[in-house]
Structures are given as C-alpha cells and as structure tokens.
Image (cartoon, rainbow, N blue to C red):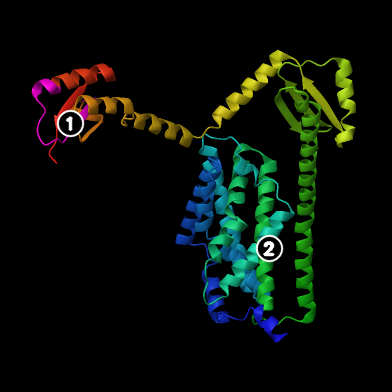
Amino acid sequence: MNKVYEFFNLHQGEDSKEKVLDNVVSNISFRGANLWILACAIVVASVGLNVNSTAVIIGAMLISPLMGPIVGAGFALGTYDFDLLKKSLKNLLIATLVSLLVSFVYFLLSPFKETQSELLARTSPNIYDVLIAFFGGLVGVIAITRVEKGNPIPGVAIATALMPPLCTAGYGLAVGNISYFAGALYLYTINCFFICISTFLIVKLLKYPKVKFVDAGKEKRITRTVSFLILVMLVPSFYLAYVLLQEKKYSQNVELFVKNEFVDKGYTLIYEKISFNSRPKKVELAFLDKRFSNVELAQINDRLEAYKIKDTELHIRQDSTDLKQDILQEINRQSYNVSEKDFTIQNLRKQLSGYTFEDKQLIKEITILFPNLVPFSIGKQLVVVDSDSSYHENMLLYSANKDLEAASVTTLENWLKTKLGSDQVRVARVNR
C-alpha cells in the first residue's frame, strides 16, 4: 500500500513552499513590462482570430502573462491570505479591462469584420470547457510546485485558452453583438474560476501553511461560498452542453433524412440550410433539376417524424430566381472570406512563375542542337538601366571550356526569341 501511495505522492520533487509562494506573488502584478506584454499578446491573438490562424492564436497564448493573478488567487484562497487575494483579483480585473479595451480597439479599426470559425468557437462554452480549465489548471499548479518545472506550463497556457475568449468578447463589443460578448466572457470566467479552484485544491492537498488563522465557522463559510460559485458556473455550462448535443443529433438526423430520401434516389442537392435555433426549426433544401408537386411535398413532410425530426418546417426551394440569388450571395460571401494571406501567396506564386524555367522540351532541344553548350542555366532576370528604368530579360548563361562562335550565339539567340516569344534574349559565357 505504501508503494502505491509513493507512486501517486505529489510531495516527491516538490519545491520549497516559500520559493513557490515567492514565485507566485512575483507573477501577480500587472505593471510596466507585464502590461505591455499582455497588450501585445492581445493584439497578436486578435489578429489570429481575425484571419482565422490557429498558429498565431497559439503563439499569443504562449506569451500571455494572464495565468499569474489567477494562480495567485488560488494560492491566496488555499492559504487564507486575503491581502494576496485582493491583490490578485485587482490585477486580474486590470488585465481583463486592458485586454478588452485593446481587442475592442483592434476589431473596431480592422477592416475585416467577418465572424471566423475561431471566433465562433469561443462564443458557446459548455461543460467540456470546464473540464479543460479544471484539469489544465491542475497540471499547471502541479508543475509550478515542482523543483523541475518541465514543459507542462506552455501546454497549460494553450489548453486553458485565456486570451481568445477575451479577444472574442472585444470583437463582440466592436461589432455590437452582445451574445458573442456574453458567451466569450462566460468562457473566460469559466477558465479563470476553475484554474483558481484547481489551484486551491492542490494548495490544500500539499498542505501549504495558512497565513492567517480562521475559525471553523469562517472556514466553513468560505467552503460554502466556493461550492456555490462552482454550482453557478456549472449549471449554465451543462445546459449549453445539452443544447450542443441536441443540435448535433438534430443535424445528424437531418443529414440522414436528406441522404435516404433524396441523395440515394439520385436527386442532386445544391442548397441546404439548417436553422436549429429558430422557432419552429427550419430546414431549407434545393435540388438541381427536381421539382416536387404539393402531394409529394406533403408526403415528404410526413416522413420527418420517422427520422426524429420534430417541430420543423421543411421548405424545398423551387423558385429558380431566388435560389440563384442565394447561391450567388453565398459565393460572394465565401470569396470575401478569402484572407489577405491567400491573395499574397497567389501573387507571390505568380511572380515566382515568371522567374522559373520549366520548359523541359526546350532544354532538351538546346542540348541536342548545341551539345558544346553544357553546363548552362536559363531564366529571367531584371536588367536595371538607371534608377527609373528597368526591364526583364531572358538570359542563357553557359560555362563551357571555350566560347561559342559568334554565328552560333546569334543563331541560338534568334532561335530562343522565336521559341520564347520575346525579343529580350541574351546568351553569354561565364567563368567557372
């Protein structure tokens, strides 16, 4: 039994309690450099959410110092250090307000206001976010109390995700969407609270000394307050998880219905829209060349119950004019969502294609007609005449042992002009 206890004993590898507490207290304050780092991290995270870049968002979470006051609050609760608790909560409030302000200003100034998937993912928290925050917080606090901190800390910063919800809340304020703001702020609150609670539990488990003596009655009141707050946080998250589950099941039932009743019968589906949150729920469909009579539509609606699709209006779009407009709007919306990064990549590829030479047949012909030319290189280069004048020239450089005869060079240049469709062609020998 002792061996089993030693296997799970958290005291093994534990750092001195005084050193850990000093480290926690030093990371609480948001002044000077810490505040600047936080503001910059918020901007980075906001850009990542704005352009839907997961890598940028992860980078912002790694440089964020937001964990400091939250862990400090957990340690303060565990050791009944109410002065430290006030200091931690004050700095957390400052950090939260600064983060909201910076993200609000960024999204207010940003020309891209489209709601990306990374933003939407932070607007509907549920019980799974609670589990991530709690167990991620446990890992983080255990790592903080070790002599060898190891590499869990960066992983905890990514998993608990404090930055993105704050930025999403700022986005909600900037675009005037209160539901986004409230959902993201609730997710942020969940993360902060359950990281704090996990810290509190580990501090208790490791038996950190109490800074102030509290009687049994006061300790019981603190425990009750913490328990009540846990319940307040959990109930909405359970409800949101239930709603998410119902929405997933509903979407699966609709997909099965569409597959069995239409796709498997050879009808080409070109439009589908599911409105789960409307009352009643709505499913809109449109098909390429199939038109349904009123009798067929009534029969199809009757079959919804068999797929557990209840309280739903099925609307099959058969007005070709309205349908075309909807499809065009969707295409335009998706085109608008193409990020500036994609345009930049396309332009660079286009420019690069102008400098690369991939005509293998032409290269093969050159080696056959001018065997003494190899080795050689061929490509396009910029020729600068003066500060205001330049042009692109097709250049063939060879490094044979001796120069080609002037007549051969002229013949080769004229032949290349014809092959490449350009008058800007030059052949030259370079020394090895």
Above or below 179: residue 365: above
| Label 1 SS | helix
Label 2 or label 1, whichever comes before in sequence order: 2
Where in the figure is residue 419, as x and y percent of width and height? 27, 19
Q: Residue at x 55, y 29 (%)?
A: 336
Give the Cα distance between marks 2 and 1: 71 Å
The kind of residue tagged 2 is Phe
Residue 380 location, x and y as percent? Answer: 26, 29
Residue 273 x %, y %: 73, 29
Q: Is residue 31 left or right of residue 70?
A: left
Range covered by the magenta-colored residues: 390-409
**Residue mark closest to the camera, 2 vs 1:** 1
Name the residue tied to disc 2: 134
Q: Dot 1, how many residues are within 10 Å of its Cα: few (below 14), some (14-19), or many (20+)? A: many
Residue 386: percent from left, percent from top: 17, 28
Q: Write down the residue under mark 1.
A: 373
